Amino acid sequence: LALSVSAACSRGASNLPKTESPVAPSIANLTAQGSCTTILDNTGSLLLKQDLSGIDPYCLRLVGGSGELNCQGHDVEGIEVLDVHGPTIGNCRMSGFSSVRSSDVTLVDNVLTADSRKTVATVVRFAEGTNNRVVQNTIDGSWRGQKYPFGGYPPGADDGILIENDANLLIEKNLIRNVWDCGIERLGNRTDPVTIRNNDITNAAECGIGGWFSAGWRDSIIADNTVSNSGTFARIYFSATQNKGVDHITFRNNVFENNRFQYPSSMGVPSVN
């Protein structure tokens, strides 16, 4: 992967052939790892100019900063944002997305398709952040109904969207399908408000919306969602002997309204989480 840098970083190297970065505009803090890319402290608008792939499951990383990323329909092996605040990620095709310790992230109008050859915990993950949004994405876990093998798990994604100690998350108008556990799952010790609204979840073996080793739900809205071809609309799991640090469950001031559950199935298989 060839990258261009700003004049300030290339002084004295004018005899080198010039090449273009896969991300425009070229910026001084762009670095390459094989065919994968890490961008540090971006604050502007970035346009992806070509597909990105490599051995790293998150081939494009944004670390710090804010700004906007428009993939212009290009394929990315996966995108991870770390400690960023206020970015919008859109028009990307990717196998997975992860947001960690980030706030005001908007993931909108993307197509996410898990690798059908691998077993993965989730397609989209939001962890340890606040005020993030997942809106109008197509999320396919690539599970094709396989039973789990002895001592293992089937290929495809356990969950479509995983909420892991993320506060005030909005999940709205997404199409989530083909996962062997839950379409949307919550885990961890936090019980901050979450809004799950107008999503279409289909072919989720265990449940449309679930909580595994989660401390509970408070002041949340679960409304106008449709779950079909799934084991249950919602399932909450807790075990005193397998609590993963969660020792209680709290349900308080939640609103469940206008949700639809149709064509129930019995395809459930054990969960990774």
Image (cartoon, rainbow, N blue to C red):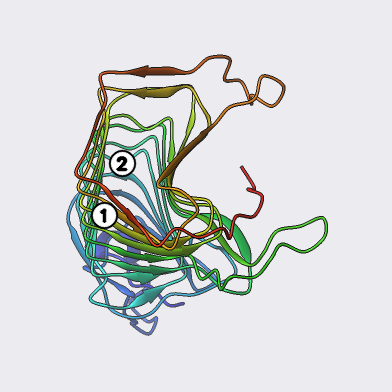
In this rendering, the answer to whether 35 lies above or below 232 is below
- Total count of labels: 2
Q: As drawn, which residue projects farthest toward the bottom?
A: 17
Q: Please provide percent x and percent y for residue 195.
A: 24, 37
> Is 251 left or right of 146, judged from the image as shown?
left
Marks 2 and 1 sit apart, C-alpha to C-alpha, by 26 Å
Q: Position of residue 185 (x, y in %)?
A: 45, 43
Task: Out of 69 and 2, give the one closest to the viewer.
Answer: 69
Q: Residue furthest right?
A: 150
Question: Residue 199 got which mark?
Answer: 1
Mark closer to the chain start, 2 or 1? 2
The residue shown at (58%, 27%) is 238
Rendered residue at 33%/82% (across/down): 18
Residue 116 place in picture, x, y as percent:
57, 74
Describe the element under mark 2 as helix, strand or loop: loop
User: Label 2, on which residue?
Assistant: 84
Q: Is residue 178 visible?
A: yes
Which mark is nearer the camera, 2 or 1? Answer: 1
Quadrant containing the C terminus is top right
Give the camera-side residue of 271 and 205.
Answer: 205
192 displayed left or right of 238 = left
> Looking at the image, is 126 positioned above or below residue 149?
above
Classify 248 as above or below 119: above
SS at badge 1:
loop
Q: Position of residue 31 (x, y in %)?
A: 43, 61
User: Which residue is at 33% across, 37% downward?
Assistant: 102
Whether label 2 touches label 1, CB < 8 Å: no
Amino acid carrying label 2: it is Val
